[in-house]
Image: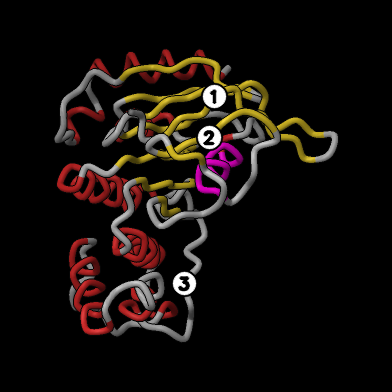
């Protein structure tokens, strides 16, 4: 059974058609990126899977269960960090746990995931004391702490510099390889989609244009970024986006 299934999904915002007759299946534990130009419906599709938007037509399910709203089995990491400025790193990570996890376990679990994303030693720093990359690591730790089956990421690394972006990509793949949750990752970057994904779903305005497989095993390092395989995929994806 697919972890994520969209069948003939459409979405309208008044007179604007964001998606039409869009179908997509993502297997359990698969890492899939959605690539496309601005305004093609990438984020709308992601938010429909998250339950933050309702489809105008079609069917959306997670593990065979219809998606009718947000659920703890699906968690979203946004481009904006959405951190509470009055809470430190641990405090921001515990937000999703409070009321759902035994009180004595909340901070322990938060510290575990803070360490997992490489922020050990910064547990009591506040957002204004963190770099952009550290803020996004905090947002990622907050999502992971809820132990979702599906992780939905909406251009999460777009606001950081190139070096930090590569570091975060590597960190994400390390965590994904260890946990094997299903990841649906929206990006504008061809290089990012190639490096991270098992499949890249290329979108055109209103729906899916083509799906491209990335036939490269994990772990992936710098050598893959500069390989002939990656270069060939860049050319193919660039042509699809033109």
Q: Which residue is mark 2?
A: 60
Q: Which residue is mark 3?
A: 83
Pick the residue in front: 44 or 81: 44
- Which residue does the image show at 75% across and 35% down from the upper left? 12
Left of 215 or right of it: where is 152?
Answer: right
Pick the residue in front: 196 or 99: 99
**Front tag of 3 and 1:** 1
- Which residue does the image show at 51% across and 47% down from the upper left? 50
Is 45 drawn above or below residue 202 in the view shown? below
- Which residue does the image show at 32% across and 62% down from the upper left? 146
Q: Secondary structure at mark 3?
A: loop
Q: Main secondary structure of the magenta part?
A: helix
Please report contact status of discs 1 and 2: CB closer than 8 Å, yes or no: yes
Mark 2 or mark 3: which comes first in sequence? Answer: 2
Q: Quadrant of the C terminus?
A: top right
Mark 3 or mark 1: which comes first in sequence? Answer: 1
Give percent across and percent down for residue 141.
31, 63
Furthest residue in direction front, as rendered: 65
Q: CA distance from mark 3 to mark 1?
A: 34 Å
Q: CA distance from mark 1 to mark 2?
A: 7 Å
């Amino acid at each position: 059974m697919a972890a994520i299934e969209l069948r003939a999904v459409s979405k309208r915002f008044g007179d604007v058609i964001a998606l039409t007759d869009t179908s997509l299946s993502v297997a359990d534990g698969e890492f899939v990126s959605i690539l496309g130009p601005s305004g093609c419906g990438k984020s709308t599709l992601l938010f429909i899977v998250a339950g933050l938007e309702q489809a105008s037509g079609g069917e959306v399910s997670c593990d065979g269960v219809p998606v009718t709203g947000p659920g703890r089995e699906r968690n979203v990491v946004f481009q904006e960090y959405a951190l509470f400025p009055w809470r430190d790193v641990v405090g921001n990570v515990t937000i999703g746990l409070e009321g759902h996890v035994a009180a004595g376990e909340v901070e322990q679990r938060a510290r575990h995931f803070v360490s997992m994303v490489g922020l050990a030693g910064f547990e009591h720093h506040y957002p204004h004391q963190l770099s952009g990359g550290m803020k996004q690591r905090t947002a990622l730790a907050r999502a992971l702490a809820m132990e979702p089956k599906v992780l939905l990421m909406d251009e999460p690394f777009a606001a950081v510099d190139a070096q930090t972006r590569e570091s975060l990509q590597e960190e994400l793949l390390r965590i994904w390889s260890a946990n094997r949750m299903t990841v649906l990752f929206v990006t504008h970057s061809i290089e990012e989609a190639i490096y991270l994904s098992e499949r890249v779903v290329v979108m055109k305005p209103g729906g899916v244009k083509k799906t491209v497989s990335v036939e490269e095993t994990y772990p992936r390092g710098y050598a893959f970024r500069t390989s002939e395989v990656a270069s060939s995929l860049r050319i193919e994806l660039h042509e699809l986006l033109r």
